[in-house]
Image (cartoon, coloured by chain):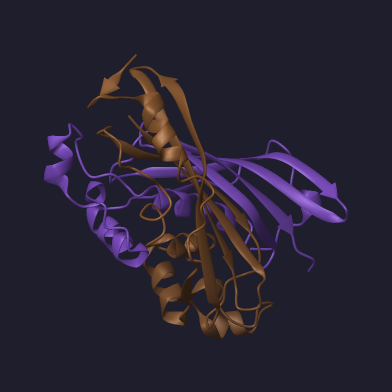
Amino acid sequence: MLPLIFEEIAEGQDIPPLVREPSSQDLVKFAAVAEDFSRQHWDRAYMESLGFPDVIVHGWLTLTYMCQAVTAWLPPDHARILRYEARHKRPIFPGRIILGGRVARKTEENGARLLDLDLWAQDAEGQVMTSGAIRLQMLDP
Amino acid sequence: MTIHDGMTIEEMAEKVRKSLYIKTEPVIFEVEKGAIQRYAQYTGETERLFFDEDHARKGRFGGIIAPPTFLSWFLKGIVPDRVFDYDVPLPTVLHTDDIVEHGDYIRPGDRISAVGELTDVFIREGRNGPMLFETGDVTLHNQNDAFVGLVRTISVLF
């Protein structure tokens, strides 16, 4: 795939969606690598006792998937991530997550070519579970 | 006015505010290549710059760099333990927001210093009553004292 150049990117453009399907085993792996052993991510019986249908995907894992959607579109040797944020609106359970984004703004500031994207993580029904944003700076070739 | 165990939410907020702006002692993390690679592997990462040393060596970075959310690795032992005060009579704690500012790339062999502090405490009215919000920041610098990142986490208690 040829690298994207700044001039080819348009405000309002959607990035290609990325699909992830974390299983409860994937949450155990993430708990190990992030050393986040909160019960809500691995103890299904506990979560059911609180009224949830299943364990919850780590917020940081969802955010990781959102960033993966961006770096799949603009790899790190083409653009540098300056800032990102996420609001976890609803708990996400193991299963299909669709990560997407849209170019909200394209600017040049002090010689830096910047892209601001809105990001989202949707469940299989298309409901936005996590919303976010990211700012990227295009790197010189 | 809602009272839990004899405390109003305003009293809980006042208690938590006593911890505002008190910086933790720095926690030092040594970044190993394997830790970056495992993080990439366990999160299903496909970008080779984050785990394939031979591939990364040929490019602009000269070696692998950490994926962007690897910054969360430096929160352990600091967030929530040493930054947030959850010792109030509210039964539910949820993590609502993450905000990250990125500085220098993180590479194998880096020595990262992490300092945390509670930076905001506020009350907002929710559908089922008032909720207590706490904001914690962890600031990261590397062995050259270069800014590596700021990780801001917001939690809600209700």
Q: Residue A137 lies in what quarter of the image? A: bottom right
Q: Is residue A12 above or below residue B52?
A: above
Left or right of residue A46, residue B86 in this image: right
Residue B134 percent coordinates (x, y)? 45, 39
Q: Work out which residue is located at the far top of the displayed protein and give it.
A: B1
Q: Is residue B136 left or right of residue B103?
A: left
| Residue, far right | A110
Residue A127 in view (yes/no)? no
Task: Answer yes or no: is residue B146 visible.
Answer: yes
State the hue of chain A. purple
Q: Nearer the viewer, residue B3 or B70?
A: B3
Residue appearing at x 45%, y 26% in the figure: B123
Measured as percent of width and height from the top left, residue B111 is found at 53, 78
Query: Residue at position x 28%, y 44% from top?
Result: A56
Tell me: residue A2, above or below residue B49.
Answer: above
Q: How many marks?
A: 0
- The quadrant of the image that shows the C terminus of chain A is bottom right
The reply, left or right, for residue A10 in relation to residue B48 is right
State the residue at coordinates (46%, 64%): B74
Q: Which of B60 and B104 lies nearest the eye of the viewer? A: B104
Q: Nearer the viewer, residue B14 or B60?
A: B14
B14 left or right of A29? right
- Chain B colour as displayed: brown
Closest to the observer: A16 or A111? A111
Instruction: Return the x and y of residue B40 as percentages of the image width and height.
Output: 44, 68
Above or below for A33 versus A20? below
Coordinates of residue A47 in the picture (x, y in percent): 18, 40
Image quadrant for the N terminus of chain A? bottom right
